[in-house]
Image (cartoon, rainbow, N blue to C red):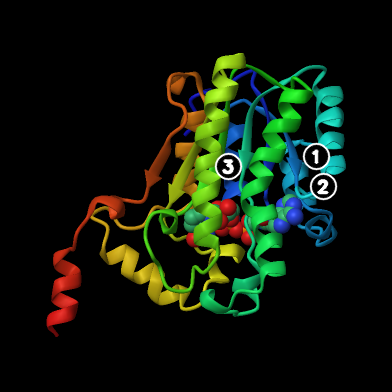
Amino acid sequence: MAYNLLKGKKGIIFGALNEQSIAWKVAQRAVQEGAEIVLSNAPIALRMGELNKLAEECNAPVIGADVTSNDDVNNLFTKTLEHFGGGVDFILHSIGMSVNVRKNVPYPENNYDFTFKGFDISALSLHRILQAAMKHDAINEWGSVVALSYIAAQRYFPGYNDMADNKAVLESIARNFGYEYGIKKQVRVNTISQSPTRTTAGSGVKGFDGFIEFAEKMSPLGNADADQCADYTITLFSDLTKMVTMQNLYHDGGFSYTGVTQAVIDQMSK
Ligand code: NAI
């Protein structure tokens, strides 16, 4: 169901790779709610070609940008401002990658070249995007920026590896830039801490099936899926949440505040 929550708004969606991607669902929901969007992803992801389907469906241009490149990110804002003839009202940062996770390097043995690469892509990119946005004056007053995080920023989870550190920094950047952009232009910046979700990035975590099942049993409402994450994100882009900023917002069916559930106790007592 659509509520016209984003009627007349314009935005940039980073990170739609395929139909499973959280960003894919957010793009579809944003357009259903009346927004016009620009889609962006790394050149390598564009070469896979799937994003063209979404672009057609959403009537949106695709502007490639590797978020570790200042030139790419600046070019994205220049072209987006041209396309819309002005600034944007929302940005989704739905980007993450760890080379240590991909190559199965255990946390204590992390290869620091891999660590820096993953940090640049997964965390520093939010700073880079916000810095470029501010320089180009690309976000309208009362605009909203959302980045996706995970509770491994606060607690240990096996297999999450250096992505835990990246998410901790991502949340910190949202907080600090949220202050700066709030003062400057009433732009809000928040992170959504999402349940484990079956996507390309999610499935890269070792033992993901057990992980997702445990979270399901540990949440009174069960795991939140990608469509539900898109719904929540839309509310944060809308004018209904204008005074929410610098927050890390759990969207996890209650997982983060549950000590243990009866379902887990029953499983352990078997
Ligand atoms: P996904 O694999 O569909 O999305 C990750 C995106 O990052 C891809 O589109 C990829 O092309 C993009 N990316 C990687 N390197 C890039 C670069 N250099 N420049 C630009 N883009 C680049 O997976 P998913 O799950 O939709 O991930 C989106 C966000 O949600 C990530 O931040 C992830 O950590 C976060 N998240 C995912 C959860 C899950 O269980 N799937 C749970 C909580 C948060």
Question: How far from the left and from the top, in percent, is residue 185?
Answer: 61, 15
Q: Quadrant of the C terminus?
A: bottom left
Q: Secondary structure at mark 3?
A: helix
Based on the displayed image, in which of its 4 quarters is residue 47 positioned?
Answer: bottom right
Q: Position of residue 215 (x, y in %)?
A: 33, 64
- Say the numbered circle drawn on residue 26: 3
* The quarter of the picture showing ligand 1: bottom right
Residue type of the residue flagged with mark 1? Val
Q: Where is 75 relative to 135, above or below?
A: below
Q: Residues within 10 Å of mark 3 (few under 14, many from 20)?
A: many
Pointer 1 and pointer 3: residues touching (CB < 8 Å)?
no
Q: Mark 2 CB in 8 Å range of ligand 1?
A: no
**Marker disc for residue 39:** none
Q: Residues within 10 Å of mark 2 (few under 14, many from 20)?
A: some
Residue depicted at x 78% and y 43%: 56
| Residue 63 visible, this orientation | no
**Residue ID at (54%, 61%):** 163
Tell me the amino acid under the disc marked 3: Val
Can the viewer see residue 207? yes
Q: In the picture shown, does residue 135 fall above or below 255?
A: above
Which residue has dot 1 on it? 73
Check disc 2 and report the residue beneath it. 69
Q: Residue at x 59, y 22 (%)?
A: 181
Task: Please state the horizontal and vertical placement of residue 223, each as a whole percent of the image.
Answer: 36, 57
